[in-house]
Image (tube, helix red, strand yellow):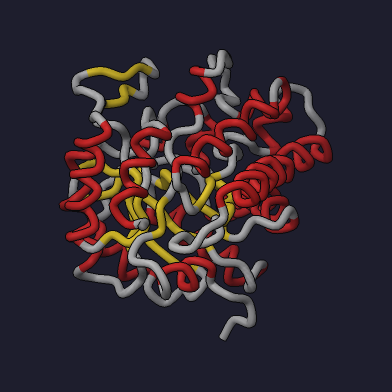
Amino acid sequence: MKSSENPIAAILAEYPVLVLDGAMATELERHGCDLDDPLWSARVLLEQPEKIRRVHEEYFRAGADCAITASYQATVEGFAAKEIGEEQALELIRNTVKLAAEARDQVWAEVQREGRPKPIVAGSVGPYGAFLADGSEYIGHYGVDDQRLTDFHRPRVQALIEAGADILACETIPSLQEALVLAELLKNEFPEAFAWMSFSLQDGGRISEGTSLKECARALEGYEEIAAIGVNCAPASFATEAIKQLAAYTDKPLLIYPNSGETYEASTKTWHAGESRSCSDFAQSARAWHEAGARLIGGCCRTTPEQIAQVSALWRS
């Protein structure tokens, strides 16, 4: 039994839904940032970190109960390709937690009220494929062994925990192999930490590499470290079915934060074939996800603070 408190369980014990934030990259672009770089939003950590804090503030003011840090693409190896040493890289990763926590504390001092929990900070742990920057997070067949994945993830996981992240967000995970590597890393080396595990999808019943959601749910059920399980960065059209699939095979809280409704083409890094959901459409979808069993709900790529505000309004007085 862990001695530390599970922050997701604590919030869900008092509230019907934990409202997640939305896209970071889209909002940074709206603030004038250029993300055309293998580091993606992590590039802004080097150049304009105050804009990351500003985006976090916007989501907290919109009603988000959780900020996901700008560390999805921030890794020691990724920064090394930019000739940034390990110590500086780790400090940049830790700073993602600091920026989110400062934004949370600033907004909470302004809007603290009954009917809403004090927001938490989730340290983003993007997949190995995000470091490769070739769309592999939507395929998952890396061709590397467990040790390689463990060694890759360990430094960032440790940095985020040391910086005070309330929970880790293992997100856009395309393979069961990588999910189990992360679960084992937490169990064996960071036993007091909690994380959620969120998969990218091939369709409503399978994660990107083709493994069924049923198998994924069952494989992670015994890990106390995994506080919630779900899907993200997937078309909203897959979302409800995916939640129904997971609900049948796990007792863990379910989470979902899909894309806006458009489809991402990993090979060209472009969005197409679909229409971005309006705030009211996104809120209506959120109701359906909740009815299917989701307890943590937010948005991923190309979603906005306005959409998160609509989601928050559904479950906050």
Q: Quadrant of residue 261?
A: top left
Total label count?
Answer: 0
Quadrant that contains the N terminus: bottom right
Q: Is residue 152 visible?
A: no
Residue closer to the observer: 228 or 99: 99
Q: Quadrant of residue 99?
A: top right
Q: Position of residue 7 (x, y in %)?
A: 53, 67
Quadrant that contains the C terminus: bottom left
**Residue 82 in the image: above or below residue 4:** above
Q: Quadrant of residue 28?
A: top right
**Residue 157 in the image: above or below residue 186:** above
**Residue 221 in the image: above or below residue 200:** below
Classify residue 80 as left or right of residue 174: right
Q: Position of residue 172 (x, y in %)?
A: 41, 44
Classify residue 10 as left or right of residue 266: right
Residue located farthest toward the bottom when viewing the structure as drawn: 1
Residue in the image at 53% along x and 45% along y: 68
Residue in the image at 24% along x and 29% along y: 278
Residue closer to the observer: 311 or 90: 311
Q: Position of residue 283 (x, y in %)?
A: 24, 43
Q: Is residue 227 visible?
A: yes
Residue in the image at 27% along x and 53% along y: 211
Q: Position of residue 294 (x, y in %)?
A: 28, 59
Residue in the image at 48% along x and 36% along y: 129
Residue closer to the observer: 124 or 279: 279
Classify residue 23 as left or right of residue 204: right
